[in-house]
Image: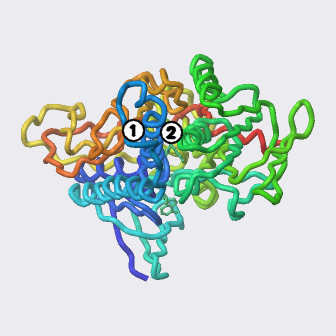
Amino acid sequence: MDTLTYDAVVVGAGPGGYPCAIRLGQLGVKTLCIERENWGGVCLNVGCIPSKALITAGRKYEEARHNFDEMGIVLGGAPTLDMGKLQAWKGSIVKRLTGGVSTLLKANKVDQLVGEAKAIDPHTLEVTKPDGTVVRVQAKHVVLATGSRPIEIPGFSFKDEPVMDSTKALALAEVPRRLVVIGGGYIGLELGQMLNKVGAEVTVVEAQDSLLPGFDPEVTKLVARACKKSGIRVVLQAKALGWEQAEDGVVVRIQTAAGEERLAADKILVTVGRRPNAEPWASALGLQVERGQIVVDKQLRTSVPGVYAIGDVASGVMLATRPPTTAKSSPRSSPATPPSTMPAPSPPSSSPTRRSPPPASRSTRPPPRATPSRSAASRGSPTAAPSRRSRPTASSRSSSTPPTTACSASPSPAPTPRTSSPRPPSPSRWTPRPSTSASPSTRTPRSARP
Ligand SMILES: Cc1cc2nc3c(=O)[nH]c(=O)nc-3n(C[C@H](O)[C@H](O)[C@H](O)COP(=O)(O)OP(=O)(O)OC[C@H]3O[C@@H](n4cnc5c(N)ncnc54)[C@H](O)[C@@H]3O)c2cc1C
């Protein structure tokens, strides 16, 4: 078996992993980034970016149907939607961005390896490549950025044709006539709203007593109002029991306070939360885990020296735009040996005394994590909730510009050399970062609970 040796290895190339790998490359650390599926991870391929592209199109389609006429914009007849073309357009945006990730990694001297990684020990991984061959990788530092996956609930297998996770919903070849969304979090709502705008009759079933549990009640109110206005039915405090084939589509059975109700549908979208891809790593390496996520300190160090975790798999809100950590310096119950620091970067040629990290030039800096737009909030879009910062919405940008309503993950293709030295991490004690219990994405699926 071949063995590759690196200073740092990043597992996963989503918005947690690839900017980390790029930064390591910029710091002169010999880095390998391993990805088993798609460069760009969930966010760029089947998350923030494609969903915002479809939402943009849905909004424009709705405007064309309802508002253009009264504004005096006359289209020679009612607009129609070509779903195939819409999917191709969305695919072109995804392709452009994910291609940019690979280019950026390369430009910053990060080696790339396609394959599924597993841990042997904290400094050794084995990677199974698509052709079945296995490579051993050894590294002083391992960063786990393995993300998360949708949660399935009993009675609603994603293998069954009418049952969809968010990935399947983003790839629909046609608009379902009737859609039942199970789980009123931001993913279900934004996809439900988008499909409603392009003609689906939508019912949202939520186990708790409000939509977007865990979000600011002001935002929840706006979203509930927006749903009502657009004819989306919301059933709160209801548990999804199962589904069965009907003569015309399917029937979803739900339990409400008033008793069992049967909802007619053609497709069922299950969006009850996402599960961090932490288990195999945690058990192989003995990492501390809380609520399914790997516990990390302020510097994203896990409980095992030399192993770091970032993104959905690490404690905190499961969003590409996660707020900065607010960890307090509470000592661990059993004091950890501080992990060794990363190799010190080579001294800068331009400003040798500078110690703080340079503001990376726009083109070299890894794309910032996603920021839901405020303007979207005022329109009642659920994607707007977690952040106060405002960004241009996809619809406000030209059609040749990738949509960045909620996730400004667009990589810039032309990196420039860095100009000064970053500060190496300080070898402070390991103190776990508190997980955010209010996270809408990490909550346990209510509808799955007895
Ligand atoms: C429909 C949808 C819409 C969303 N919209 C927004 C939004 O508007 N704003 C926002 O902030 N967030 C949004 N999110 C959440 C956002 O996508 C995630 O928080 C983000 O992708 C997490 O990044 P990550 O790098 O931790 O993991 P991921 O993006 O999941 O990437 C992890 C990568 O690791 C790879 N991997 C896993 N295990 C291995 C292994 N063993 N070996 C090799 N590779 C491995 C995976 O293939 C994957 O590519 C959305 C999510 C969805 C599903």
First in sequence: mark 1 vs mark 2: 2
Please tell me how crowded label 1 is: few (under 14), some (14-19), or many (20+) other residues with Cα within 10 Å. Answer: many
Q: Quadrant of the N terminus?
A: bottom left
Question: Pointer 1 and pointer 2: residues touching (CB < 8 Å)?
Answer: yes
The residue under the point 49% across, 53% down is 46
> Residue extending furthest right?
259
The answer to whether the residue bearing label 1 lies less than 8 angstroms from the nearest atom of ligand 1 is yes
Across and down, in percent, residue 85 comes to 41, 57
Mark 1 highlights which residue?
Answer: 369
Which residue, as the protein is rendered here, is positioned at the far left? 350
Residue under label 2 = 319
**The C terminus lies in which quarter of the figure?**
top right
| Res. 141 in view | no
Q: Quick one: 3 or 200, which is closer to the camera?
A: 200
Q: Nearer the viewer, residue 317 or 167?
A: 167
Element under label 2? loop
Q: Secondary structure at mark 1?
A: loop
The answer to whether any part of residue 295 appears in the image is yes
- Residue 250 is drawn in which quadrant? bottom right
Q: Is mark 2 within 8 Å of ligand 1?
A: yes
Please state which amino acid type lies under the numbered disc 2: Leu
Is 316 situated above or below 250?
above
